[in-house]
Amino acid sequence: MVTLEKITALPNFSSQLENKILYSEHTSDIEIQYESACSIKYVIEGTKEYNHSHQDSLISSGQYIILNNKNISTRALKGSKGLSFFLSPDLIGEIYSNLYARDTSLEFFEFPQSNHNLIGDELQKMAFLYENQPNLFKLQMDDLFIHLSETVIKEHVKIKAKFSELKIIKYNTQKELYKYATMAQTYMHDNFTRKISLDTLSNAIGVSKYYLHRLFTEIMGYTPIEYLTFIRLNSAKEQLRLSKKTIFEIAVDNGFENSSYFSNVFKKYFGITPTIYREQ
C-alpha cells in the first residue's frame, strides 16, 4: 500500500501522487518542482524551503508543515535531512469516511509547526525509528503511515470544530488564528524554564495579551498559563523520576519560584507531593 524511497541526489520525479514515504539526505544543494498529493514535510536536520500557494515556508529542524494538493517547489541545502509523507486523495477520503461516516474535502492549514503536538510527536518518533531501526520501520511502515494520516485528519477536524463553535468561517482567518495559538505553544515549550508572563508571551507573538488569552483559551481549551504549568509539571515529573536533584533544584529548573510553590502546584494537579511521587 505504501512505498518507501530514499534519495541523496537531485530527484528526477515530476509528481508524487500516491501513498509514499520519502526519506531525503541531501549530499548537495537541490531545487526541484513537482506536482504533489497532500503531503507532510518533516525536517530532521538543517532547513528546507517550500514554495506553495504563492508563498515561501522555511522549515527548520524539528518542524513540519502540511501542504495541500498542489505544485510545490522545494529547496534544500547540503546536509539537510527529512521525511515526506504523501497522502493520496483516495486515502484521505477513505479515512475521513471511516472516522466520521460522511464525505468531505479537507483543506489543511499550511504553515510551519513544531513537534510539540500529537502530529509532531509522531513524526519525531517515526524519524528516530527510521534512522535507528530501519528494518523495524519497514515492517511497521504501513501501520505507521495510516496512524499518522488518521492523526492529521482527526486534529484538523477537531480544530475546525472549534472554529465552527466560534462562528469563524474563512479559511485564511482560521489559519492565522491557529498560527498564533501554535506560536504561543512553541514559545512556551522552548522557554518554560524562564519566567514567562502573559505580557512576555504576547510580546513574543506580536498580539495583545487580552486577545492572545482569549484566542488561546478558546482554541486550545485552557489558558496559556494553565498550558505553561502543564509543560513545567511534566518536565519536573521526568526529573523527579530520572535525576538525583533536590526538589528545590527541580523546581527552579522548571520555572517555579521556589520549592514550596512547586510542591503545592504539583499536589494540586497530581494529588501527591513531589517527594511522595519520587519515592513511589
Image (tube, helix red, strand yellow):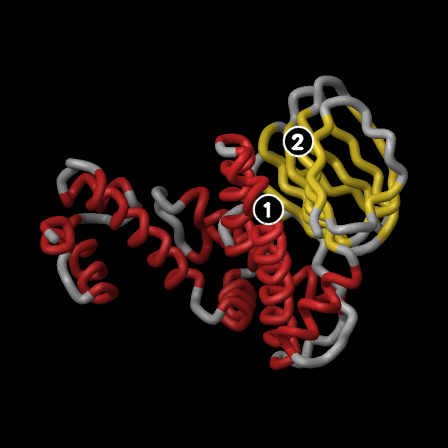
Whether residue 210 is visible: no
Which label lies toward us, 1 or 2?
A: 1
Contact (CB < 8 A) between labels 1 and 2? no
Q: Gap between marks 1 and 2, in whole Å?
A: 25 Å
Whether residue 217 is visible: yes
Does residue 85 appear left or right of residue 185 in this picture?
right
First-in-chain label (1 vs 2): 2
Where 272 sits versus 39, above or below? below
Query: Which of the labelled discs sits on residue 47, or is there none?
Result: 2
Position in image of residue 192 (x %, y %):
38, 46
Where 151 sits versus 44, above or below? below
Q: Nearer the viewer, residue 225 or 143?
A: 143
Where 237 sits versus 220, above or below? above
Position in image of residue 83 (x %, y %):
65, 38
Residue where numbered disc 1 is placed: 141
Tell me the element at label 2.
strand
Q: Nearer the viewer, residue 220 or 44?
A: 44
Looking at numbered disc 1 in the image, what kind of residue is underneath it?
Met
- Please tell me how crowded label 2 is: few (under 14), some (14-19), or many (20+) other residues with Cα within 10 Å: many
Tell me the element at label 1.
helix
Position in image of residue 16 (x %, y %):
82, 45
Q: Residue at x 35, y 46 (%)?
A: 195
Looking at numbered disc 2 in the image, what kind of residue is underneath it?
Thr
Position in image of residue 178 (x %, y %):
62, 62
